[in-house]
Image (cartoon, rainbow, N blue to C red):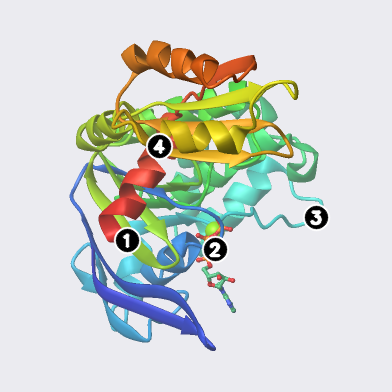
């Protein structure tokens, strides 16, 4: 349904997209993950025929974005990261406007609007002003708007951004419902965990480059493996005992220590062990044997998100 090949886009000297190649099959929920400025919006704008790439190709529903804009616009629904709101419009008028823009016959509009409002749980707000809706409701209205012409492919740019936890869960169930209806979804986010569970595949993008593309199960398995490869312990030492740098020297001779970093000013010692918990005891003993006085001993909790980013960055090098 979506296919890009070596997609490249420059803004002046900045490379916003660097040979991006990805493929999204029918019925997939593709989580497009990357930090600010990674190139997510640029990719979606190219797929929606709003921006032209400098090189490479992008196809949606088999149509080339360079030559078949009209065909693509009929089969996609693009929800930008910010909902453009016209003043003094009610939810109903807002959707009527888009339905007419998509050339939906006047007679059919009321039914369709009723359906999309029901789906996005906005029926109660039909006659409220768009301006007065909460952020969560506005985001759901953004989804409602891209559904009026019943497109096969939805490009949703950070639909969960700025939402509270409850609204996020509601947004997630809405997206799951859309996938159940057979739509192909490309959904962007900064956060892997936000999309991880609901995506059938994900792509991680950073500085215009695709660092990882594949199944979520694979991604989680790989991230977990890397997270358990070795623990990092942060030790805080009292000023009365040996200095962190003295202890660091003693520790680094041991094969169980991958790396140690000392900060004498802050009296901290960060130790990367070669494996997990069963080496903690050895570390404690060694520090004490070196005359170090331990104030705190804290294994760093490796978040899945961090591990995953580390993993993907590693894959690139
Ligand atoms: N119209 C433009 N003119 C100049 N630079 C642009 C333009 N659009 C995007 N960029 C630059 O291209 C890069 C990619 O931007 P893009 O908006 O695609 O990132 P993003 O992944 O969507 O980020 P965010 O998470 O902040 O929305 C950024 O460095 C951005 O500054
Ligand atoms: Mg963006």
Query: Element at badge 4?
Result: loop
Asked if the residue at label 4 sits under 8 Å from ligand 1, the reply is: no
Task: Classify 138 as above or below 180.
Answer: below
Question: In this figure, which residue is indicated by the disc labeled 4?
Answer: 252
Image position of 235 (left or right of 198): right
User: In which quadrant of the rendered view does residue 174 lie?
Assistant: top left
Q: Is residue 239 visible?
A: yes
Which quarter shows the N terminus?
A: bottom left
Q: Between marks 3 and 4, how big is the CA–CA gap? A: 65 Å
Determine whether the residue tagged by mark 1 lies in a helix, strand or loop. Answer: strand
Secondary structure beneath dot 2 equals loop
Mark 2 or 4, nearer chain start: 2
* Image quadrant where one finds the C terminus: bottom left
Q: Which mark is first along the chain, 1 or 4?
A: 1
Q: Circle 3 sits on which residue?
A: 87
Mark found first going from the N terminus, 3 or 2: 2
Closer to the camera in the image, 131 or 214: 214
Task: Give the x, y percent position of residue 17.
Answer: 40, 73
Nearer mark to the viewer, of 2 and 4: 4
Residue neighbourhood size for the residue with mark 1, other residues' Cα within 10 Å, grouped as few (<14), some (14–19), many (≥20): many
Confirm if mark 2 falls within 8 A of ligand 1: yes
Mark 1 lies on residue:
210
Q: Residue at coordinates 44% horizontally, 36% vertically from top-left?
A: 305
């Amino acid at each position: 349904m979506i296919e890009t090949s070596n997609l490249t886009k420059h803004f002046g000297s900045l490379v916003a997209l660097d040979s991006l190649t990805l493929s999204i099959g029918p019925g997939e929920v593709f989580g497009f993950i990357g930090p600010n400025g990674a190139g997510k919006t640029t990719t979606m704008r190219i797929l929606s025929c709003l921006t032209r790439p400098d090189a490479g190709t992008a196809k949606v529903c088999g149509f080339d974005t360079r030559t078949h804009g009209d065909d693509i616009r009929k089969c996609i629904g693009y929800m930008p990261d910010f909902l453009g709101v016209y003043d003094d419009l009610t939810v109903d008028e807002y959707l009527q406007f888009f339905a007419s823009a998509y050339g939906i016959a006047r007679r059919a509009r009321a039914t369709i609007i009723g359906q999309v409002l029901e789906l996005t749980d906005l029926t109660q707000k039909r006659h409220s002003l768009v301006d007065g809706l909460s952020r969560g409701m506005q985001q759901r209205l953004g989804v409602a708007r891209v559904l009026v012409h019943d497109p096969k492919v939805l490009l949703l740019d950070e639909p969960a951004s700025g939402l509270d936890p409850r609204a996020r869960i509601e947004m997630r169930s809405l997206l799951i419902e859309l996938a159940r209806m057979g739509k192909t979804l490309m959904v962007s986010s900064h956060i892997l965990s936000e999309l991880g569970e609901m995506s059938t595949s994900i792509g991680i993008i950073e500085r215009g480059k695709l660092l990882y593309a594949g199944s979520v199960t694979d991604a989680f398995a790989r991230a977990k493996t890397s997270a358990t490869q070795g623990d990092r312990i942060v030790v805080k030492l009292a000023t009365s005992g040996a200095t962190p740098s003295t202890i660091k020297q003693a520790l680094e001779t041991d094969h169980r220590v991958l790396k140690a970093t000392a900060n004498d000013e802050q009296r901290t010692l960060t130790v990367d062990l070669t494996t997990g918990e069963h080496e903690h005891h050895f570390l404690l003993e060694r520090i004490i044997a070196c005359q170090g006085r331990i104030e705190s001993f804290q294994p760093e909790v490796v978040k899945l998100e961090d591990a995953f980013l580390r993993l993907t960055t590693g894959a690139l090098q």
